[in-house]
Image (cartoon, helix red, strand yellow):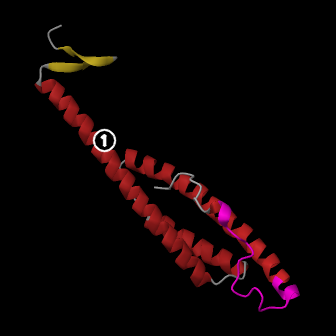
Amino acid sequence: MTEQNHTHPDADSFDPGASSLAGQVDPAVMAELLSIRSSIDNIDATLVYLLAERFKATQKVGFLKATHKLPAGDPGRETAQIARLRRLAAEAHLDPAFAEKFLNFIIGEVIRHHEAIAEDHEAALAADTQAADSARTAGRVPGPAGPAVSATA
């Protein structure tokens, strides 16, 4: 599952100007390098938040699949998505093989999450079934709005 939104203890100590090149490079070159890196830092932050949103959506898919006993993976969908992302990557002048590796990594994580959700769902159903069986064995049946009532009441 995705981690909750926790601020890393050292989040405020991030130094965007940190570089092992400081003092060894012309100051104008260093300023340009830091400017470009600032854009990269913004893009990296955006990627993290986009991935978090993506995983929130895939969690919902996982719960839906678990509820309806659907398989964690969907090979047809995965194949179509990989082909789609390879096309998009080529259009964006990004290496399609890299895009495929990246998507395969994400798909692997999503499937792992879906399997965990399904296991949790099955365990909860088993616990509910066991509780109902125990109540029947004890001569009680669950009441409509809460505590068990006697079968002879």
Amino acid type, mark 1: Ala
Extreme front residue here?
Answer: 23
On the image, the x and y values in percent for residue 108 come to: 45, 68
Residue 70 visible at all? no
- Looking at the image, which is closer to me, 98 or 19? 19
Q: How many marks?
A: 1
- Looking at the image, which is closer to me, 25 or 96? 25
The picture quadrant where one finds residue 125 is top left
Dot 1 crowding, Cα within 10 Å, few <14, some 14–19, many 20+: few
Residue at which label 1 appears: 124
Q: Is residue 23 magenta?
A: yes
The picture quadrant where one finds residue 25 is bottom right
Q: Is residue 31 left or right of residue 4?
A: right
Residue at x 75%, y 77% (from the top left corner): 37
The picture quadrant where one finds residue 49 is bottom right
On the image, the x and y values in percent for residue 11 come to: 63, 61
On the image, the x and y values in percent for residue 81 come to: 56, 69
Residue 30 visible at all? yes
In the displayed structure, 3 sits above or below 45; it is above
Magenta residues span 12-30
In the displayed structure, 95 sits above or below 51; it is below
Taken as a whole, is the magenta stretch helix, strand or loop? loop
- Looking at the image, which is closer to me, 101 or 16? 16
Q: Is residue 27 left or right of residue 13?
A: right
